[in-house]
Amino acid sequence: MEQHPEIRATDTLANERTFLAYIRTALSFVAFGFVIARFSLFTREISIIAHMSVPGQASTIFGVAVATTGIIVGLYGAYRYVAADRGLHRGVVVAMPEWVAVLCGLAVGAIGIVVAVELLALR
């Protein structure tokens, strides 16, 4: 592919750093989802030992949803990397759509609310 004459190494390296940030974030979501799902298993085991009943499988479902969000973030990061790289070669800035930023903010807020509610319910 022919490079645009104005491409600098710093532009390409910044794009790669951004991609790595997406990957780090995706792995964090996957790990966090795993921890949430395992916490559900832990509370069930404790409830058996303590002869108590613990509410359903909300933590497991939520953990799987958070891990799935991580997969989506990783895939979107790969898409953004390719789109930005193509834009660099064409000499065009490819900005992230505003709706994606709003959706991500809402998703993180929703995850925080669910975690807070679950923690308060376990008190």
Image (spheres, grey):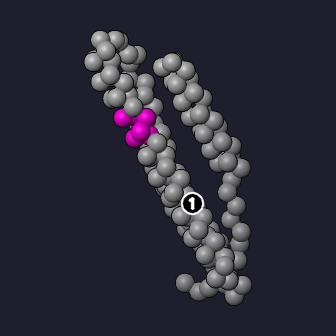
Amino acid on which disc 1 is placed: Ala
Q: Position of residue 89 (x, y in %)?
A: 63, 78
Q: Residue at x 51, y 62 (%)?
A: 78
Q: Main secondary structure of the magenta part?
A: helix
- Left or right of 115? Residue 41 is left
Residue 11, located in which quarter of the rendered image? bottom right
- Left or right of 6? Residue 89 is left
Q: Is residue 10 above or below residue 95?
A: below
Residue 81, located in which quarter of the rendered image? bottom right
Q: Is residue 68 visible?
A: no
Q: Residue at x 62, y 44 (%)?
A: 104
Q: Nearer the viewer, residue 123 or 3?
A: 123
Q: Which residue is mark 1?
A: 21
- Magenta part of the protein: which range? 33-38
Residue 79, located in which quarter of the rendered image? bottom right
Callout 1: 10 Å neighbours few (<14), some, many (20+)? some
Q: Is residue 90 above or below residue 119?
A: below
Q: Position of residue 64 (x, y in %)?
A: 41, 37
Total labels: the figure holds 1
Q: Position of residue 107 (x, y in %)?
A: 60, 38
Report if residue 48 lies within the magenta region.
Answer: no
Q: Nearer the viewer, residue 7 or 90?
A: 7
Q: Is residue 55 above or below residue 71?
A: above
Q: Is residue 18 visible?
A: yes
Q: Is residue 39 above or below residue 68?
A: above
Q: Residue at x 51, y 24 (%)?
A: 118
Q: Position of residue 43 (x, y in %)?
A: 36, 24
Report if residue 37 lies within the magenta region.
Answer: yes
